[in-house]
Image: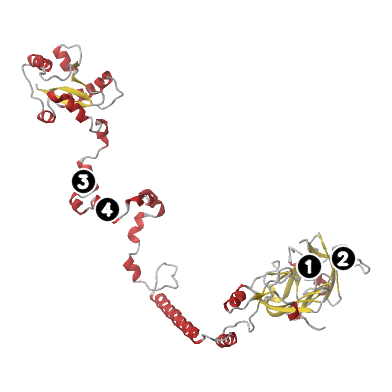
Amino acid sequence: MGLKCVTMLIKDGNLSKDEIKEIALSKLEKYNSIDKPNDNIAMVINPISKDSFYLISNELKEALNLDYNIVEVAGARSDNSELNAKIAELDAKIDNEIVTLSNEILTKASLENHNNLVASLATYALKSDLDTLATKDELLTKANLSDLNTLATKDELLAKADLSNLDNLATKDELGLKANISSLDGLATKDELNNYALKSEINTSGGIDENTLNQAINQNATIQELGAKVNHMATNLQGATYTQLVATMKYLGYELPSELRAYADYNLFADDKLSGDLIIGFKPIEYTGSYGQAWENVAIYNELGEKLTAKYASISSDGLNIDAVFAKDIAHPKGDSFEAVPSDYVLADGEVRVSITLGAVSYYGATYGLRMLNNNPSSWPESFLGGSHSYDEWIFTFHNYKPTKFSITNGTATYGGYGYMTRYEMRLSIGNWSKTLTYENSNYPNNIEIDFTNLNFGSDAKTIELAKAWNVPVTPYDINSDMVGG
């Protein structure tokens, strides 16, 4: 049987001496069960409280017939007489076998320097933290130690990046939310991307065949050629007048306004110089769809923004003329059940007399022309469906009245594919003033709206931009430029 001394460091300022003894005794018993046939005593040190004592196992305590496991040492003394006496006593009772204290312990600190040893051990880590440290084998699985020479030092890293910006970098978890890291091997490198040409189209399979690639290259060449021509034309047109530019663009197949004017929006409703019957005309230029045109949702709006629709309506026997009275708060649609305008009818306050000239007769007969006055029709019998592709003008006359807005629908959602105008002239007339504009349309149905408080006579955003480029000022619209007759 041998005797060894082991050192136990328990760094805790909250545990009592008895609690420390119980912890150390448990550790010592486990250690003795492994290190048989030797028996061990423990030197227990608390660097925080500066307490220290020697501890023997329960087995050794019984063998020595002692009352306690703790063997007290009364302070650090140079002669160590008390310790020597204790060791001598142990020596006599265990067959005179004395084990020399571990060379490792003796080289760290002698018993004479006990207090210095306590102070120095206080700077080491808690024994309770050792379980969280990696073993040598675990470290070997994390990195190839043979590569350590290739790793950058702290100073080298500082030279490569500003560590003050580290807070702005994404963590591994944050990067994981942004992209599937397992897919990185499938991404193209910079060199691989540089090998691809301009692509105008990618097929549904995700690949690019040779024909598609050649088409993209040819289109790229065409774009470059067009760019060269534009640059050449711009060089040759330097100093050209607007008239010369219009002629040149027309020759190339493009159109510009023959006379460049830029007008501000015009408020016809508020212009007291214009009064009398307001006329709105629509003259078809091009059609599309089956049969003739469809019309519905005829309405005007007063100065309060209130909607006025047909209250009474009569139609001529030939189906081409309607006489109506418009008023607010009229329930629609009425289908074919409009009540005729009484012959002696006197307009109430806010009501408007309206005359309409139709460009075509209804497909279902002359009297069915009144259907165009329906608002919000829910089925085709409530919509006007023209019987032929007529190019005659559709005219709406509002007697002695200027609405703030007029609206109408050309085409219908109640009968898909019925006819509507894709190109037409719109004529506005009141008193001696008249203005005709041409419009193109691809919407079906086409909801036409005219705001008489904010009329735009061809001076759209593109025209105004062009005018500014030629230093043509944006001026108020002059009604005198469109006066006719007296």
Give the residue number, with chain letter if any, for mark 3. 140
Give the side of residue 168 with respect to residue 331, left or right.
left
Depth check, front residue: 423 or 209: 423
- Quadrant housing the N terminus: top left
| Mark number, residue 339 | 2
Up/down of 156 relative to 241, above or below: above
Kindly state the secondary structure of the residue where label 1 is placed. Answer: loop
Quadrant where the image shows the C terminus: bottom right
In three-dimensional space, the C-alpha distance between marks 3 and 2, rounded to whole angstroms, equals 99 Å
**Quadrant hosting residue 375:** bottom right
**Cα–Cα span, label 2 and label 4:** 92 Å
Q: Are marks 4 and 1 in contact (CB under 8 Å)?
A: no
Label 1 belongs to which residue? 403
Q: Amino acid at mark 1?
A: Pro
Closest to the observer, 421 or 225: 225
Label number found at residue 157:
4
On screen, residue 43 above or below 171:
above
Position of 375 relative to 460 (above/below): above
- Residue type highlighted by circle 4: Leu
Marks 2 and 1, the one that precedes in the sequence: 2
244 shown above or below 382: below
Tell me the tag on residue 219.
none
Name which residue type carries label 2: Glu
Q: Residues within 10 Å of mark 3 (few under 14, many from 20)?
A: few
